[in-house]
């Protein structure tokens, strides 16, 4: 071992920081899952706002530096919900990818942006 | 060492899988950031739908098992956007926590669910 | 007849005002339907934010007076989209109600908040 | 005079139909404002989904006929919330336009898609 943390440790340190942040402010009383899900939705909208009125599907001029904070805000609520339900995010997404690969077989989905129900 | 992967490696394996999933289907042509941000927003809404009409701020009866997939769907687009902008999610959220701690000092935010602009 | 306007006239006066507001500011260049739909979504989120963190499913204390403006903002973008596609909103909703009555027959939907696919 | 309804009457007939639709199904028990606001947000997302993955800011090919129903769904929840709070939508939007005209003076806003805080 050595001085550097690997990502697993980094994530655990970060998650411990998030939990302490909430405990210190006595915010757990507010964190029922419905309100967490609303907060996630609101942050996803703030991120989307960075693209409002653009024509070229890129971020607004002068807003590029904000994407990092907005993505972080969304991830924050994803982590809060995963903590609430004791969900391991990595294995949840890994299992979802199993389903996605079945729903979108390469030969049907190749070069198409359609929903699996319309392939 | 050994046969088990740590989380850093797990995340890298997962991210490589996601990238390959998109490349195999020739989907990169669709993945401009505005459409990624819309997709993230749509998945956040699907997650919120699990709580529609509930009174007790818990998930709908019979929908508990869906939360894991919906969270995974949101995380999928968060990762896609972070890949697009080459953002390290863990350090992005770590930096955002620095800001959150300044915006919500304990003595002001204690036991209050108000936005920092209203503390 | 007399000096007072009926609602049809009121709506037409209001819509003419909205159109002039945009023309005067040379905003039509921005108003493609995708960006209108994003704006509608963002305003729906601002309205939802009035309910963030509440437990009792009522609006936040001190925010009651804002609901009127937020509803107006949503309606503004609904009208903008209806103008773009030349849709008569009243008859659109009237037709949708025909469908809703078929999708949710009274004997099946009575006292249930489930989606029609789950009745 | 005459057999035709004007728009005011049309709207009142439509609103009476919506209210009866809910009463007949005993749905008023679910219709607290927070859940109405969530439903409005979910329908705004369904409308936005019609534009997912498009590059040209137009609606998806083959989805044009759905815009009318999706707009109607959004308007439905706008009306439900306005009924809940006894808000006259036309005068609410008229008052909001007064504010918009002050927030976006022509000489500042001309040809710009920026938020009033950034003009």
Image: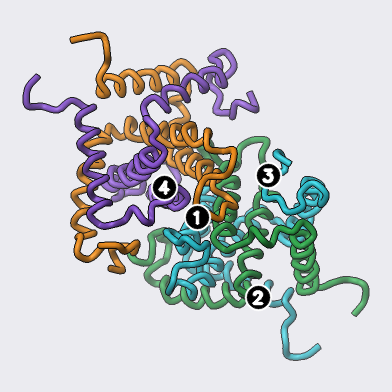
Chain colours: A cyan, B green, C purple, D orange
Residue sitting at x 57%, y 52%: D54
Among numbered discs 2 and 3, the one appearing first in the sequence: 2
Q: Is residue D94 above or below residue B81?
A: above
Q: Position of residue B55 (x, y in %)?
A: 50, 37
Judged from the image, the secondary structure of the residue bearing numbered disc 1 is helix
In the picture as drawn, the residue positioned furthest to the bottom comes out as A2
Residue sitting at x 45%, y 61%: A54
Disc 1 designates what residue?
A: A39
Drawn side of residue D8 relative to residue A25, left or right:
left
Label 3, label 1: how far apart the Cα atoms are: 26 Å
Drawn side of residue D116 relative to residue B38, left or right:
left
Report whether residue A113 is seen: yes
Q: Is residue D86 above or below residue C76?
A: above
Label 4, label 2: how far apart the Cα atoms are: 39 Å
* Chain of the residue on which disc 3 is drawn: A
Viewer-nearest of discs 3 and 1 = 3
Q: Which mark is residue A115?
A: 3
Q: Which mark is residue C40?
A: 4
Disc 2 designates what residue?
A: A13
Check if mark 4 and mark 2 are on a common chain: no
Residue sitting at x 71%, y 58%: B27
Q: Residues within 10 Å of mark 1 (few under 14, many from 20)?
A: many
Q: Which picture quadrant has residue C91?
A: top left
Drawn side of residue D96 relative to residue A110, left or right:
left
* Chain of the residue on which disc 1 is drawn: A
Q: Are marks 4 and 2 in contact (CB under 8 Å)?
A: no
Q: Which picture quadrant has residue D18?
A: top left
Q: Which picture quadrant has residue D9?
A: top left
Q: Residues within 10 Å of mark 2 (few under 14, many from 20)?
A: some
């Amino acid at each position: 071992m050595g001085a550097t943390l690997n990502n697993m440790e980094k994530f655990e340190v970060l998650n411990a920081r998030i939990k302490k942040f909430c405990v210190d402010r006595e915010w757990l009383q507010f964190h029922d899952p419905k309100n967490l899900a609303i907060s996630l939705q609101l942050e996803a909208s703030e991120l989307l706002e960075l693209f409002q009125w653009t024509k070229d599907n890129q971020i607004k001029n002068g807003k590029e530096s904000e994407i990092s904070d907005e993505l972080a805000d969304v991830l924050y609520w994803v982590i809060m919900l995963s903590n609430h339900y004791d969900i391991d995010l990595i294995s949840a997404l890994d299992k979802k990818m199993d389903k996605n690969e079945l729903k979108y077989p390469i030969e049907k989905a190749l070069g198409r942006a359609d929903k699996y129900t319309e392939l």
